[in-house]
Amino acid sequence: MCPEPNEVYGDDPEVGRWLRERLPRHPAPPQLRAAVVRTLNPEVRRPRWGFAWLGPSVAALATAMVMVMWMATGLPSLRSTDPIQQISRAVVTEHARTLTWAQREPDVVPAALPRVMEESGVILNWVFTGDEEIRLVSAQPTYVEGHRGISLGYMDADGHAVTYVIVPSGGVTLPEEGRVQIERWRPLIRRENGFSLILWKDKGMLCAMIAALVSESDLARLKEYFVKVRSQTELSPVF
Amino acid sequence: MTSGEEEFRREAIQHLDALHNLAVYLTRNGSEAQDLVQETYVRAMRFSHRFEPGTHLRAWLFQILRNTFLTFYRLREREPALSEDGVPAGRAPMFHDAPDWDGESTEAHTDLERALARLPEEFKTPLLLAEVEGFPLEDVARIMDCPVGTVKSRIFRAKERMREYLKDYGRETKA
């Protein structure tokens, strides 16, 4: 598409002209075009090469973070004594792992849910699988702070990844400070490393939703997702 | 395949070059840009049934690309904090890779690219969307998920910084 100059700024049109006329454009190389065509064609399975950096890089990051967390046990100064912060950081790590899993096994749900529930020890009587705004795209068993649980990955229509983690609460108490009223619930909202988290307890389980939705409008959107997940997912923990 | 799905695929592929161009300037790495673009299409496909011909598919695809980039950028940006290497998070190069230019650009182009690479993402993206891709400010605001006034301000400041950076190189681009 041929760009038309924006003439609304009136401040420094010269910089805009330089960019339009002199900044090199980088058209898609043939192999990318072929891969995208395959992606747009549902009859053809997506090739593996497309995950070259997204999967391995996030996996490497998760591994590195696990190693750092392991080493940090010998370095008390590096490890927070705040259990909520520890959980929040663990959930961020889980978010990275979920993104990797969703890319490796994009078709894992909903068929794999029974197996994942059995392996995780978390039984969900009802699961919110999505609507016009957000969809369930992955499910996997997980360990968060030493507790076995389940991790559900969602993707919204604008490409935001949302991870919903459920683990036994292990006696963790959510503080009053930071809680907000969202419809009939009062979950805890936190920010951790550029991500927003919503934490709450349900039937003795600790639940967390995390996404890179941090602006005011983004957070409002995450709250809407929370309401959908909270109201349409029913836990039945068995241990 | 319905006619709506066919229309989606036909229109979506038309924006491939523009998406890849922005991805290159965001990631500054050829292979990462390709993966980012493909991931954008994968995510768009999940909601392709919502597509209505004549709607803002182009802006939506750019919005998905930016959101996907930011998610992975934030995850990667956690690495320096954990390694305690003393690099402030905001100063870390995007994805910790050097720019990957083709070496065929003229010197003036290189300066322009270098200046652009120094802009923070929140300035660089609206500048490129508005000035290079020709998006109306309303669409840029939708992609950036911020008010139009904020977009105007960021573009203004982006241009100011571009001027400063180009002067830093000692040879401001001649018109």
Image: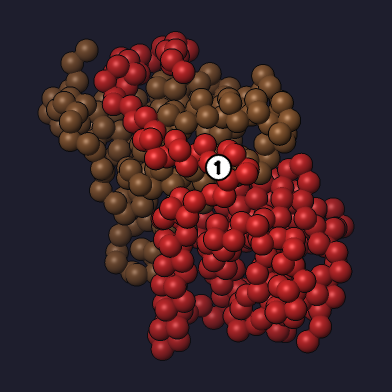
Chain colours: A red, B brown
Residue A6, horizontal then vertical, whole percent? 45, 14
Residue A72, horizontal then vertical, whole percent? 43, 82
**In the picture, residue A202 is in which quadrant?**
bottom right
Q: For the image shown, how many numbered marks are present on the structure? A: 1
* Residue in the picture at 65% in, 25% down: B7
Residue B70, horizontal then vertical, whole percent? 49, 47
Q: The numbered mark 1 sits on a residue in which chain?
A: A
Q: Amino acid at mark 1?
A: Thr
Question: Does residue A237 appear anywhere in the picture?
Answer: yes
Mark 1 Cα shell of 10 Å, populated few (<14), some (14-19), many (≥20)? many
Is B104 on the left-hand or right-hand side of A47?
left
* Residue in the picture at 40% in, 83% down: A71
Q: Secondary structure at mark 1?
A: helix
Determine whether A108 is above or below A159 in the image.
below
What residue occupies the far left of the structure in this picture?
Answer: B170
Is A22 on the left-hand or right-hand side of A37?
left
Nearer to us in this view, B47 or A217: B47
* Residue in the picture at 72% in, 84% down: A171
Determine whether A23 is above or below A123 in the image.
above
* Residue in the picture at 50% in, 27% down: B15
What residue occupies the far front of the structure in this picture?
Answer: A43
Q: From the image, which quarter does the N terminus of chain B lie in?
A: top right
Question: Residue beneath label 1, please?
Answer: A39
Determine whether A14 is above or below A209 in the image.
above
Q: From the image, which quarter does the C terminus of chain B lie in?
A: top left
Residue A82, horizontal then vertical, whole percent? 58, 77
Question: Does residue B126 appear anywhere in the picture?
Answer: no
